[in-house]
């Protein structure tokens, strides 16, 4: 039976390849990119197990199945995938880490754990397929592929606090920081709607557009990297 380590090792073979938001034929073992985050994860899972997950239609023909972060959220939410914790993801290779999209149809993020506190992921146009860390970033699901076996390592991750993040919530986030982000978006030529200090759908859409223009992960959330591009001073989470 294939393992989570096999999944990670396969994805790692594509480190350094290019990023693009484009469909990937899941049954093409020789595909060398470009990738987006959901496509890399779904392709690697299919190549390892022969099963589609994280696609808008998991029963589609693998050559044309479309992977999407929102579909990974769906599969994790309806328990098609197993569930684990962030601590387990840090020391177990092949765990799928999922950030849900900010808005329906928007972009979330998907990565694969290394078992040593890192990930392999298609991180964006500026970064391509690369290694990053698990801790200190927002994840909503830590998922296990049912057809894989998993084994923990002895790795112990150092705790790292999440940075300040602006994201779409109910009730909505409000305040001076939101207003500064809205004004900065407007100054950069991206219309956030009314500059009212409320982090609503219009502001999220503007953030996503700005992120795409600046080769950032277009997840509609403002953290230190997006704030730096906007020229907004970002608060220390501590």
Image (tube, grey):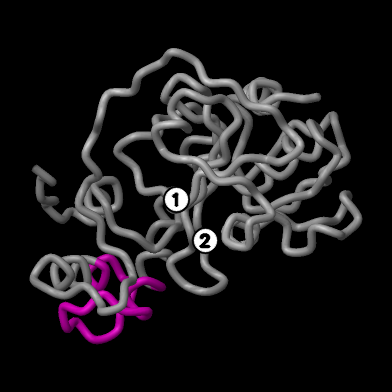
Residue 81 at x, y = what percent?
65, 49
Q: Which mark is residue 107?
A: 2
Label 1: which secondary element: loop
Marker disc for residue 195: none
Residue 159: x, y in percent? 25, 30
**In the rendered structure, which segment of residues is drawn in magenta?**
185-205
Q: What kind of secondary structure does the magenta stretch mostly adopt?
A: loop
* Label 1 – label 2 distance at C-alpha: 8 Å
Mark 1 neighbour density, 10 Å: few (under 14) some (14–19) many (20 or more) = many
Question: Of the residues under marks 1 and 2, which one precedes in the sequence?
Answer: 2
Does the stretch in magenta take in 202?
Answer: yes
In which image quadrant can residue 93 be found?
A: top right
Q: Are marks 1 and 2 in contact (CB under 8 Å)?
A: yes
- Using the image, determine if residue 224 lies above or below residue 79: above
Secondary element type, mark 2: loop
Q: Nearer the viewer, residue 212 or 224?
A: 224
Residue behind mark 1? 217
Image position of 86 with respect to 74: above or below: above
Residue at x 50%, y 41% (from the top left corner): 84
Quick one: quadrant of the C terminus?
top left
């Amino acid at each position: 039976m294939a393992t989570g380590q096999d999944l990670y090792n396969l994805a790692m073979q594509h480190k350094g390849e290019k990023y693009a938001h484009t469909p990937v034929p899941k049954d093409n073992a020789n595909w060398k990119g470009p990738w987006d985050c959901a496509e890399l994860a779904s392709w690697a899972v299919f190549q390892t197990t022969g099963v589609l997950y994280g696609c808008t239609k998991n029963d589609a023909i693998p050559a044309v199945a479309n992977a999407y972060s929102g579909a990974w959220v769906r599969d994790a939410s309806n328990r098609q995938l197993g569930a684990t914790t962030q601590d387990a993801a840090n020391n177990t290779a092949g765990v799928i880490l999922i950030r849900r999209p900010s808005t329906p149809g928007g972009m979330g993020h998907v990565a694969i754990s290394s078992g040593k506190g890192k990930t392999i992921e298609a991180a964006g146009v500026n970064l391509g397929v690369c290694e990053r860390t698990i801790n200190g970033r927002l994840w909503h699901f830590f998922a296990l592929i049912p057809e894989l076996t998993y084994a923990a390592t002895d790795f112990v991750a150092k705790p790292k606090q999440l940075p300040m993040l602006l994201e779409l919530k109910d009730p909505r986030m409000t305040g001076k920081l939101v207003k500064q982000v809205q004004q900065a978006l407007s100054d950069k030529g991206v219309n956030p709607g009314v500059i009212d200090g409320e982090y609503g759908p219009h502001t999220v859409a503007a953030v996503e557009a700005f992120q795409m223009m600046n080769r950032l992960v277009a997840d509609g959330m403002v953290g230190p990297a997006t704030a730096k591009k906007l020229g907004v001073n970002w608060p220390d989470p501590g």
